[in-house]
Amino acid sequence: MKKLSARRRHPLAAVVVLLLALAATGGLYAVFAPASKAQADETAQSLAIDEGQKLYAVGCASCHGTGGQGTSDGPSLVGVGAAAVDFQVGTGRMPAQQPGAQIPKKKVIYSQAEIDQLAAYIASLGAGPSIPTKSQVSPEGADIAKGGELFRTNCAQCHNFTGKGGALTHGKFAPSLEGVDPKHIYEAMQTGPQNMPSFPDTTLSSKNKQDIIAYLDAVNGDDTENPGGLELGGLGPVSEGLFGWIFGLGTLVAVAVWVAARTAKAKKS
């Protein structure tokens, strides 16, 4: 009986064995380690959505509905994605001052942190285009010539050959792209704001969009050289020559008529 009682294990022996096994397999760290980065990111995203919902309730719900479902005063925001919010709010177009044929760009009233929160909330309502990364909008390494070709094919009909903008029908217009943040140009191509068609990656790839941004930076950037002359919307020497020909010839004709009239009057007198 004494030998049997001597061999009886201590009640905590099983716990010690389990802890040793967890330590050997790395499980001990998993049990006692702090929350993972993924969990921290998820928590931060949840907080951003909550704050964005509060901002939305104050500044957006009156037109777009309490749940983003849309009303007679504003379209549904379900599925537009974070990129649409970053573009519309980040350029001051939203919240709109008043309805009209087109909502113009104006002073931004939200901070970038608040815009990110609004974008997070709208993105939670339905999947949509995300905000592009810095590498996606950087002109470095892009094909400027290809970007010019793509821009003239898909964009010049409205925005002019160098992005100077132009008038459309019924009070609408294509805004100038000079000085626009590359991120917002990318987002506009992604989402198709207002009268603009959208160009998803199936139509214009991310690389194509980067090439277009590089082209616009090349023709409208701060370092772009202008050899002089009247640009006339950047249409080139043909339009400038035509302008000079019409108005120059018109001036010469007017002077000739004036001289002839003066000569005839002098002869009569």
Image: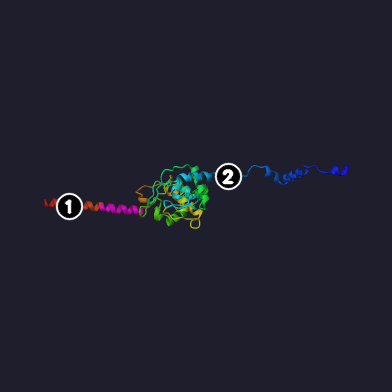
Give the label, 1 or 2, closer to the camera.
2
CB within 8 Å, label 1 to label 2? no
Q: How far apart are marks 1 and 2 (CA)?
A: 86 Å
Question: What colouring does the structure picture have?
Answer: rainbow
The boundaries of the magenta stretch are: 235-250
- Identify the residue at image location x=20%, y=53%: 257
In magenta segment, residue 246: yes
Which of the pair 69/159 is nearer the observer?
69
Q: What percent of the width, then of the height, locates residue 251?
A: 25, 51
**Front-lying residue, 46 or 199:** 46
Look at the image and tell me whether residue 183 can be seen. no
- Which residue in the structure is indicated by mark 2? 43
* Left or right of 133 in this view: 13: right
What is the quadrant of the N terminus in the image?
Answer: top right
Return the x and y of residue 84 as percentages of the image width and height: 47, 50
Tag 1 residue: 261
Label 1: state its secondary structure: helix
Residue under the point 23% across and 53% down? 253
